[in-house]
């Protein structure tokens, strides 16, 4: 199916956000709505090609896809150092509202890595039934912040500057209100605190499915014990979860820009399954 | 478990070595020897090792010598696994 791509700026709280809307050219062919919540910092940049390829493919399969560059990220105005977690959650909510006004059909929030945390935080404010498409989701903001701060330690390690305080000392600096520069990103104490307290959770109000896709270079890949435990917890709360490991490179962190076609295929298969279920038996197809 | 093989697979994936790691020996230098191994890559290698082997690394357990060469990194992982 032919698709239409449109780049534009969406004003949120008086400041623009760069967005790309990709949808079937013929509006009546739109079968669902996907809003992308991007990964954090360098992971977003590394994954930019993959998410663009996926969005085009989703659109070619009848889905309208909105990708937003969060405040201070990508091609959106603002400084990364001024961003907060709350602003970003608001960006995702604003993106959903804009997209919903443009297209009908079941809503998916599509989160990559830390974008999954944003999806989960945005859900209560989205106030409509939604499903989640998660790509290698980050589920603990605390753990993720630690991994991010390590990058600063690793840089010191390579430069042979001895830093014996570790991540603990970096966290203390943030708590004292001092911003840190990590891997070229100015991390404000406010943003760090927001990430630190973020935890993936969905409540009964989800009213949709969770499709959880992890990527592994080993074949056959298996879900990590931590992931399995998290999925079991979701299921015990009555959430409909489909989880799979696909084969491919960790494109959000590889040195070269990589692609993972299997991940896109698995996503399309799941996005379409949902539509088919919703289209029957009360919907008349022309 | 083929710890060495798994460690090389992680390096190959994260550093986009496209199979170059199959020629690596224990004395192949990592830090200073592989231009791909910058600070982000070091952290991503550690994160991938943690996820693949299911252990957690404390900051004070690692320094430049851990990533000196393939042998030192494999030895570090074996130490974490207690094998």
Image (cartoon, coloured by chain):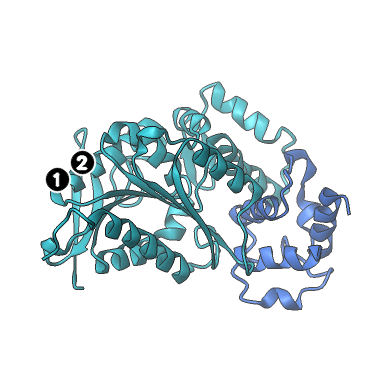
Chain colours: A cyan, B blue
User: Residues at marks 1 and 2, common chain?
Assistant: yes
The subunit carrying tag 1 is A
Please state the chain letter of the residue tagged with numbered disc 2 in the rendered image. A
Q: Which mark is residue A97?
A: 2
**Is residue A78 shown to the viewer in this render?**
yes
Where residue A101 is drawn, which disc sits there?
A: 1
Q: Quadrant of residue A11?
A: top left
- Where's the C terminus of chain B, which quadrant? bottom right
Left or right relative to A101: residue A18? right
- Badge 2 marks a residue whose secondary structure is helix
Q: Left or right? Give the position of A25 relative to B36.
A: left
Identified at 30% across, 64% down, the residue is A58
Which percent across, then down, holds residue A186? 47, 39
Q: Please say if B16 is above or below A34.
A: below
The residue closer to the viewer here, A173 or A32, is A32
Spatial CA distance of label 1 from label 2 is: 6 Å
Between B54 and A275, the one lying in front of the other is A275
Q: Is residue A55 above or below residue B46?
A: below
Looking at the figure, which quarter contains the N terminus of chain B? bottom right
Residue at coordinates 74% horizontally, 63% vertically from top-left?
B7
> x, y (%) of residue A79?
36, 40
Horizontal side of residue A125 vs B9, given as left or right: left
Q: Residues within 10 Å of mark 1 (few under 14, many from 20)?
A: few
Q: Is residue A185 left or right of residue A5?
A: right
Q: Residue furthest top?
A: A176
A250 lies above or below A187? below
Say whether residue A82 is visible.
no
Residue at 70% across, 35% down? A166
Residue farthest front in this picture: A281
Tag 1 secondary structure: helix
Front residue (pair A146, A74): A146
Q: Which quadrant would residue B77 be assigned to in this image? A: bottom right
């Amino acid at each position: 199916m032919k698709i239409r791509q449109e780049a534009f700026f969406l004003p949120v709280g008086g400041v623009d956000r760069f967005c790309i809307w990709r949808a079937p050219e013929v509006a009546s062919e739109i079968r669902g709505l996907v809003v992308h919540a991007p990964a954090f910092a360098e992971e977003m940049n590394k994954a930019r090609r993959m998410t663009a390829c996926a969005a085009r493919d989703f659109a070619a399969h009848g889905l309208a896809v909105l990708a937003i560059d969060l405040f201070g990220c990508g091609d959106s105005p603002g400084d990364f150092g001024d961003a907060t977690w709350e602003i970003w959650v608001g960006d995702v909510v604003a993106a959903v509202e804009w997209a919903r006004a443009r297209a009908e059909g079941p809503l998916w929030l599509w989160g990559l890595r830390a974008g999954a945390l944003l999806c989960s935080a945005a859900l209560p404010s989205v106030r409509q039934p939604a499903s989640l498409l998660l790509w290698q989701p980050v589920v603990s903001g605390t753990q993720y912040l630690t991994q991010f701060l390590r990058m600063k330690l690793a840089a010191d390690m390579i430069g042979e500057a001895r830093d014996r305080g570790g991540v603990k000392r970096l966290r203390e600096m943030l708590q004292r209100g001092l911003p840190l520069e990590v891997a070229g990103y100015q991390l404000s104490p406010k943003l760090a605190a927001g990430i630190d307290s973020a935890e993936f959770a969905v409540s009964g109000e989800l009213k949709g499915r969770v499709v959880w896709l992890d990527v592994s270079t080993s074949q056959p890949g298996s879900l990590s014990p931590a992931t399995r435990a998290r999925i079991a917890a979701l299921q015990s709360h009555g959430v409909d979860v489909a989880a799979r490991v696909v084969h491919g490179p960790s494109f959000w962190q590889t040195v070269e820009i990589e692609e993972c076609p299997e991940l896109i295929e698995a996503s399309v298969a799941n996005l379409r399954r949902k539509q088919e279920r919703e289209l029957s038996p009360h919907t008349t197809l022309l | 478990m083929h710890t060495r093989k798994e460690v090389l697979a992680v390096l190959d994936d994260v550093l986009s070595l496209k199979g170059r790691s199959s020629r690596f020996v224990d004395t192949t230098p990592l830090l200073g020897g592989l231009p791909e191994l910058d600070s982000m890559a070091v952290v991503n290698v550690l994160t991938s090792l943690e996820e693949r082997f299911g252990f957690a690394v404390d900051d004070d357990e690692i320094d430049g010598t851990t990533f000196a060469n393939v042998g030192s990194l494999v030895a570090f992982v074996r130490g974490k696994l207690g094998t």
